[in-house]
Amino acid sequence: MPMAKFASLAEAETGSTQVSVGVLFQVQLEDGTCIVVLDDRGFSTSAQWQQVTPDQIRDTTLAVVGPDEPGPSPVIRWLSPKGS
């Protein structure tokens, strides 16, 4: 099944007055099925929520979902078309 898109979901950690965000990274297939690729990412800072902008949260979210090591994960290899 071909991939339609990758999606990152950033959610504020409940009860935190300082910036603390959990990040879920998933791939959506053309049929709408979502497969979790990474569920162990997130970030926090000493800044208060009112000190950060949505753009800063988005940019940091996109940075933290990257792989820890070079090369595609087994899930990405499984989802990739043969020969990629």
Image: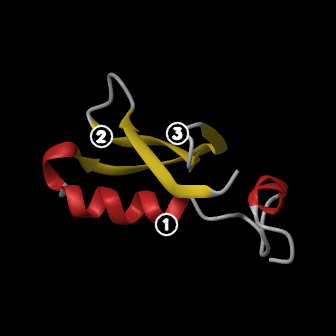
Residue lying at 23% horizontally and 63% vertically, measured from the top left: 55
Q: Judging from the image, what secondary structure is the residue with disc 1 in?
A: helix
Residue lying at 40% horizontally and 62% vertically, measured from the top left: 60
The CA span between labels 3 and 1 is: 25 Å
Q: Judging from the image, what secondary structure is the residue with disc 3 in?
A: loop
Q: Earlier in the sequence, mark 3 or mark 2?
A: 2
Q: Earlier in the sequence, mark 3 or mark 1?
A: 3
Q: Left or right: 50 with respect to 65?
A: left
Name the quadrant containing residue 67.
bottom right
Q: Which of marks 2 and 1 is nearer the N terminus?
A: 2
The CA span between labels 2 and 1 is: 19 Å
Give the labeled residue for mark 3.
Answer: 32
Q: Judging from the image, what secondary structure is the residue with disc 2 in?
A: strand
Q: Nearer the viewer, residue 25 or 50?
A: 25
Q: Left or right: 1 with respect to 14?
A: right
Q: Which of marks 2 and 1 is in front?
A: 1
Give the labeled residue for mark 1.
Answer: 63
In the rendered image, residue 73, in percent from the top left (x then y), is placed at: 79, 60
Residue lying at 40% horizontally and 44% vertically, measured from the top left: 10
Name the quadrant containing residue 33.
top right
Q: How crowded is mark 2: few (under 14 residues within 10 Å), some or many (20 or more)?
A: some
Q: Residue 18 carries which label?
A: 2
In the rendered image, residue 34, in percent from the top left (x then y), is placed at: 58, 38
